[in-house]
Amino acid sequence: MKILFLEPFFGGSHKDFAVGFKAHSCHDVTLVTLPDRFWKWRMRGAALYFVNQIKDFSVFDAIITTDMLDLTDFMSLAGFDLPPALMYFHENQLSYPLAPRQKRDFHLGFTNIISALAADKVLFNSRFHFNDFISSASQLIKQMPDFRPKWMIEQIREKTEVVYPGCRFAKGRIDLKERDMNKPLIIWNHRWEYDKNPKLFFEVLGGLKEKNIPFSLALLGERLAMFPEVFSRAREQFKDEMVVYGYVESRNEYLSWLKKGAIVVSCAIQENFGISVVEAIRFGCIPLLPNRLSYPEIMPKEFHSKILYQTKEELITRLEDMLVNYQEYLPLQERLSIELEQFSWEIIVKSYDNALEKLRK
């Protein structure tokens, strides 16, 4: 099949997903993108750009796009020869957590709802995310003063499936290198933004440092020009523990840090899947994750009692134990790495290809 992939926000997980799908799909994928900036304007205006950019949509068998596109605008402007459209939700504007003093723009949330309704097929990146979206969409519709289109929710349900995003690692056993047992390396490889809750992360590390518990720290992950001030303070606070501070451009260098990492910690307020965590675990980091969001869903149940925490106090206790008794956790390392092989693009891509092939029938 000839597939047209329209990505209005080509950066971060959106870019990772688009590039990964194009590289691994058995279909012929044409990727048309816009840069990852001015996200609200992308939701309002990307449809106009794509309609003007693509001269003949009829040469394609299907379209994939993501939640940053107003699909209703696009379909109304693109003409009558459109192939069926599949919409993939990385996040949504109904339940995405707001930074302090931010106000929610419900117009953008409603754009997500009617775009899902307009799509021929809808995919979400986790069951948690889908349930969160449906719940938030139902609440927004209840706020309408009259003529509430509650029927939309059921129609969206009927055309939706959950398919996890692929991750950039090969299937098969990975050779896990030895870690530093004396100062285990803690990995932060999330975006440097409010919704990943860096404040809690550094508070916990500060408490461990006061107790003279040895560790080293790698602050990786993407960051914008403006990022939470807590990262700048952490650079000074943990200058003796810090081995890397900031995003590394080279994929090989990034993976080399994951392979040295002992523990990957998440304190996230928002996480619909967690590619960065899955990557770190696959290359040998032992995870410590909140028992909520997508994590209970994507982590094997048999390990929940060892790697998921409920409260800040439990996070502190668990992390201290992992650092002090790191060697006792090593049996988890290889077992988790093998379990998460299932998220390799080589394996996952078949679900996307099948979904597209069904659209043609």
Image (tube, helix red, strand yellow):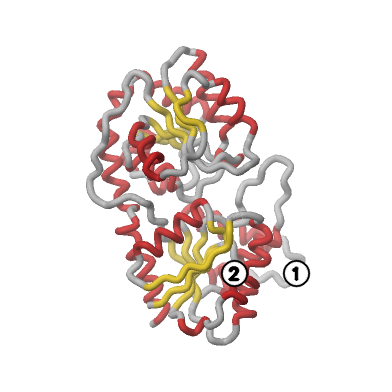
Relative to 340, is 289 on the left or the right? right
Height in image: 206 above or below 2?
Answer: above
| Depth order, front residue of 199/77 | 77
Q: Nearer the viewer, residue 353 or 218?
A: 218
Residue with the most extreme right position: 145
Which residue lies under the disc numbered 2? Answer: 115
Q: Which mark is residue 146?
A: 1
Q: How far across and how far down the image is residue 177, in percent?
A: 26, 33
The earlier-in-sequence mark between 1 and 2 is: 2
Q: Quadrant of the N terminus?
A: bottom left
Q: Badge 2 local density, few (<14 within 10 Å), some, or many (20+)?
A: many
| Residue drawn at 48 percent across, 74 percent down | 63
Mark 1 residue crowding within 10 angstroms, few (<14) / some (14–19) / many (20+): few
- Distance of label 1 from label 2 (alpha carbons): 21 Å
Q: Which amino acid, mark 2?
A: Ser
Q: Residue at the location (56% across, 33% down)?
A: 198
Q: Is residue 339 visible?
A: yes
Quarter occupied by residue 284 = top left
Q: Tags 1 and 2 in contact by the CB under 8 Å rule? A: no
Q: Position of residue 338 (x, y in %)?
A: 26, 44
- Residue 180 place in picture, x, y as percent: 32, 24
